[in-house]
Image: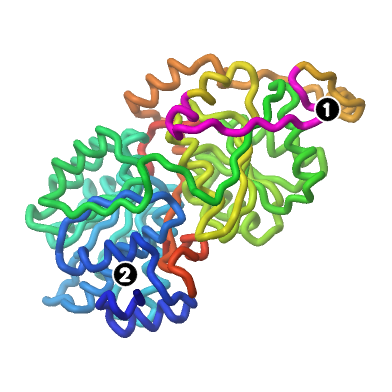
Amino acid sequence: MSFAELGLAPELLRAIADEGYTQPTPIQAQSIPLVLAGRDLLGAAQTGTGKTAAFTLPILNKLIATPPTGAQRQVRVLVLVPTRELAAQVGESIRTYGRHLPAVKTAIIFGGVGINPQIDQLRRGVDIVVATPGRLLDHLQQRTVNLSGIQMLVLDEADRMLDMGFIRDIRRVIAVLPKQRQNLLFSATFNNDIRGLAESLLNNPASVEVAARNTTAERVEQRVHFVDKSRKTALIAHLVKAGDWQQVLIFTRTKHGANRLAEQLMREGIVSDAIHGNKSQNARTRALADFKSGKVRVLVATDIAARGIDIDQLPHVINHELPNVPEDYVHRIGRTGRAGAEGEAISLVSGDERAFLKDIQRLLRREIPVVVIPGFEVGSAPSAAELATRAAHPERERPPLAPGNDRGNQQRRRSSAPRSNGNNNNGGGNSRPAARANPQANRGSGRPGGQTTQRAR
């Protein structure tokens, strides 16, 4: 099937061709006709499947088919996303595929930046608003956005929004929308909470599922290294140097742990940076840009911040600590092995994390191979070089802030999703539209394709 067969406008087909794509991915081939037909949609898709283009392309097509009327342009499409980075990337997808549609105007609304430029843009009139829930509520409270003309609502990464405690914010936004509208809900996983939200939001929806529930990318080679907690950093440095890895994404459980690991790797001569919610939006954007361009070799991220990382052919993902929630493992390793490219996901597991590993393997319904790295076996003595580095930098031996045996408390905090007055660990992932010559070869689904539970502003 080609994009032309999906009924898209010539301007969109031209933009798709500009990007070098020829065939839609499965999620696009199934979703686009349904959205164009006006159906509500419940879509299940992993990152890297072209999900973002699956809704941005038909949205743009519908907007140009029905030009705005009246003197004041009304917002007609609202896309709610959990994080700032994802808002920016969905906006980039809309710009990419709408480049030949100058009449379509889009506003990207998220926190961490000044609100006044957003107010000015909204006053000038836009067709599409892409927003995080917290900042959108700020605009609603200040009456700087009017959502009475919404014709389409998209909830992207709905599972992550629920995880981050946004359900009340989402319902507050939905309460001010017109009752008659088209609704699209996309989620990487379908748990009971997601299904409950879908039942309350969607009207006789079509369902599209392109991957089995909670599966991981087929092309991701997964392996586990059992290692003492105190030697994880040394093992990472060994793997990066021995393999001459040039682009590595590492996950930590906390923001403090991300900073500390990046600093430790810098001392090992590996150019590294960290991305998490305590960093300003500009710092996060800069770190991600440096990582994508190759200026930074290793990027250390918390779970939520990493949702904004969407890189063509990212080869290596390392779990410095395993996540407390098994589904987060699926999200983490979904950063690599995207769009037909091969990748590997490596988990460093200390003794107090073995229960987490069992939970993950139970979710995956498979065992992850264990590989022993000579010299880093559990209980083995540190090398002379490690001891010398420890002596030179004793501060690196401070205990982690989030002990691995805090599993029960972490899960309770996650499930209850309390609010916090701290900074938000934001991130985002999305999808490029299509494969070039191969329906599975989407380039990374990028533009179009420590955990906290506070509101994304």
Q: Is 67 rendered above or below residue 325?
A: below
- The residue type indicated by label 1 comes to Gly
Evaluate if marks 2 and 1 touch, with contact meaning CB atoms under 8 Å apart: no
- The residue type indicated by label 2 comes to Leu
Q: Which label is found at residue 339?
A: none
Residue identifier under label 2: 57
Give coordinates of residue 218: x percent, y percent: 50, 49
Q: Is residue 254 visible?
A: no
Q: Residue at x 27, y 62 (%)?
A: 31
Give coordinates of residue 10: x percent, y percent: 31, 85
Q: Is 343 rendered above or below residue 357?
A: below
Magenta span dominant secondary structure: loop
Instruction: Report whether 288 appears left or right of 239.
Output: left
Q: Nearer the viewer, residue 231 or 289?
A: 231
SS at badge 2: helix
Name the outermost residue toward the left: 180
Numbered-mark total:
2
Q: Is 196 rendered above or below residue 45?
A: above
Residue identifier under label 1: 375
Residue 248 is one of the magenta-drawn residues: no
- The tag earlier along the polypeptide, 2 or 1, is 2
Quadrant into which the N terminus falls: bottom left
| Rendering quarter of residue 394 | top right
Q: Residue at x 42, y 55 (%)?
A: 430
- Give the spatial CA distance, label 2 vs label 1: 52 Å
| Rendering quarter of residue 74 | bottom left
Q: Which residues are magenta?
A: 359-378
